[in-house]
Amino acid sequence: MVSFPVPGSSYRGPAPEFAGFRASSPVVRLPANGGGHCWIATTQDSVRVVLDDVRFSRAASYEPTAPTFPGLFQAPPGMIISLDPPAHTRLRDLVSQAFSVDRIESMRPRIQQLVTELLDQADSEALEGPVDLLGRFTFPLAIIAISDLLGVPAGDRDTFARLIREFAAVDAPELAAAAGEQLGEFMAALVFGKMAAPGDDVLSALTEARIGDDKLEVGELIGLGYTLLGAGGDSTACHLASSVLTLLGHHRDVWVRLGERPEEVPAAVEELLRWITLSTNDTTGLPRIATEDVLLFGVTIPKGDAVFVSTNSANRDETLFIDPDALDFARTDNAHLAFGYGIHRCLGAPLARIELTTAFEELTRRFPAARLAVAEEELEWQKADMNHRLVALPVDLHGKGF
């Protein structure tokens, strides 16, 4: 019998077993690899219910009696993704002040500038051969954007980028652990700097956020910095790289068409957000504990059991999406859950959309003849515990490649 985490996930879709799970029940019980068992919400309806129901507690997953799942990333306690209402509500209300529509929209010209500059550099390198778009474009774009968001000083940005790369080095655990410790020190120093001398950035706005006399504490600010780094840095870079691979490897006609019809790019971005599978274990990796017996779609989840939500599977829900395994760039009703749902919906979603849309508008316009420089089978993937992450993405920008 298959156990959790279910093997077989790839950037092109969740493990094949999830189609059977959805057909059998919106919520399935699986044995866990480390012993015990867990439940997984697999459909749009069940994922939304679990994310919305306060009887499924994130905070309870940190209690000594909670089931554990070795090998899965577990965010530190106290972070916004680790809290329940009312603590989560308080934190989100304060954080939302720094993520106003006007503030995020004001970043659009800067994103356009970054995309243009990075692609200018890539174009220059393309004269000498294939360009690694992961190393030269998708990763730098995401990291510079998050550096802007956090207000990282110009002189510290090379160090910041290096620590992020080393922290993601899952094949070098000692290097990653050391980088993680240094990142913590870096983030703490950054927070104290913003508290002393706020700038025009989101982290500064977070230090100044107030509801009455309430404000964010130092530990909360550091945790939010980490959350922004993970969601806005690594996830965006990985998704953009997988999206480029998808189009160049399987839908070059769409790549060419988007360059000719930029008005179609936003819809294409939404379909790629739905279709690309980001998380390696096909769930958010964040267990929720039933605080009482809960009847869910005809199944009783016992008190104390862990429930995971699979947004990857929910985004392939046959009851909501016609031919869900197909990439349909003409899809109009695209209610995907790539950014979560309800109170746990990603606050940075508008910024991610700006980055992805701008990147594809410029990539497809400037390089209509771009091709993969190697066969897809030759591409190497990191053994990551969170996101499907390429090691490199070599591309012939002017069409001389594979």
Image (cartoon, rainbow, N blue to C red):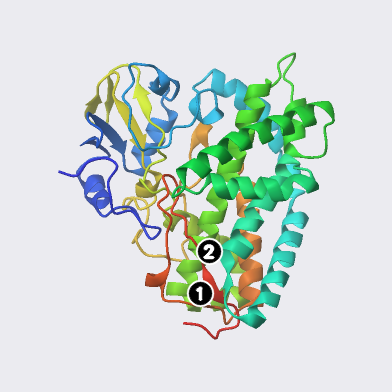
- Residue at image coords 41%, 65%: 327
The image quadrant of residue 153 is top right
Q: Is residue 368 left or right of residue 212?
A: left
What's the amino acid at mark 2? Ala
The CA span between labels 1 and 2 is: 9 Å
Tell whether 310 sits left or right of 101. Answer: left
Residue 24 placement (x, y as % from top left): 19, 44
Q: Could you tell me residue 72's position as x and y percent? A: 38, 37
Classify mark 2: helix, strand or loop.
helix
Q: Please state the horizontal and vertical placement of residue 82, each as a whole percent of the image.
A: 49, 27
Residue 219 vertical placement versus 180 (above, below): above
Residue 95 location, x and y as percent? 66, 30
Q: How many neighbours does mark 2 have within 10 angstroms: few (below 14), some (14-19), or many (20 or more)?
A: many
Q: Residues within 10 Å of mark 1 (few under 14, many from 20)?
A: some
Identify the element where label 1 is drawn. helix
Give me the disc on residue 171: none
Q: Residue at x 44, y 73 (%)?
A: 249
The outermost residue toward the top is 213
Q: What residue do we see at 26% from left, 55% from top?
A: 16
Mark carried by residue 254: 1
Q: Which of the two discs, 1 and 2, labels the residue nearer the N terminus?
A: 1
* Residue 318 falls left or right of residue 163: left
Quarter in which the N terminus is drawn: top left
